[in-house]
Amino acid sequence: MRAIDEWVNQTGMGSNKRFIILEAMEQTNVSARNSLLKILEEPPEDTYFFLISEFPNRIMSTILSRVRRYVFPPLGKEAVMLYLKPYYLHDRQYESLEQFYLEGGGMDLNKNRQIAGMLFSSVKSRRYLLLPDLQQLLSNVDDVDGYEYVLRALLDGLADALEEE
């Protein structure tokens, strides 16, 4: 709140309108609430605060007495689906949130699993890859920025192999 107080009291060039959005005010500590209350008692000109809360009844009544309250109804299921639609990837089911984000970011997880499988098979069979083949595999991993994923898949394969012994 100190940083907000300093910012709203700075003089600026051009438009001096300031908009501050504070979310989950009910979770702030006493010091932050008191600082906000002080700013709201004598707000700088052209400064607008938006307090967003799922539980407005948990916000200090002295703060609520200094603001206008607007209640927005929850979005309907159709509106939520319309909003989220661009974030779904071909209406697929994903094994994990990690898979959703990695594939959504463009990583080809199947290709990375294949690379890890080839490396694992090479080590397990003691038929080590020739340098050009290894360089090609690592180049493929580099292309998809998948080192962490490939290494984890390789270590999982090694752990499974050790458990089998």
Image (cartoon, rainbow, N blue to C red):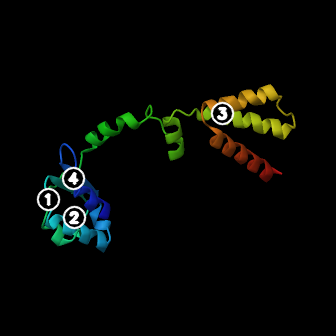
Q: The residue under label 4 is which amino acid type?
A: Thr
Label 4 vs 1, first from the N-terminus: 4
Residue at 32% across / 71% down in the picture? Answer: 29
Q: Is residue 36 above or below residue 157?
A: below
Q: Which residue is mark 1?
A: 69
Q: Which mark is residue 49?
A: none
Nearer to me, 91 or 137: 137
Query: How many neighbours does mark 4 have within 10 angstroms: few (below 14), some (14-19), or many (20 or more)?
Result: few
- Contact flag, marks 1 and 2 (Cβ < 8 Å): yes
Asked which secondary structure carries label 3, the reply is: helix
The answer to whether residue 38 is visible is: yes
Q: Which residue is mark 4?
A: 11
Q: Which residue is mark 2?
A: 56
Query: How many neighbours does mark 2 have within 10 angstroms: few (below 14), some (14-19), or many (20 or more)?
Result: some
Label 4 vs 2, first from the N-terminus: 4
Residue at 14% across / 55% down in the picture? Answer: 70
Label 3 vs 2, first from the N-terminus: 2
Q: Which residue is mark 3?
A: 141
In the rendering, at what x and y percent does residue 65 appear?
Answer: 12, 67
Q: The residue under label 1 is which amino acid type?
A: Arg
The answer to whether residue 111 is visible is: no
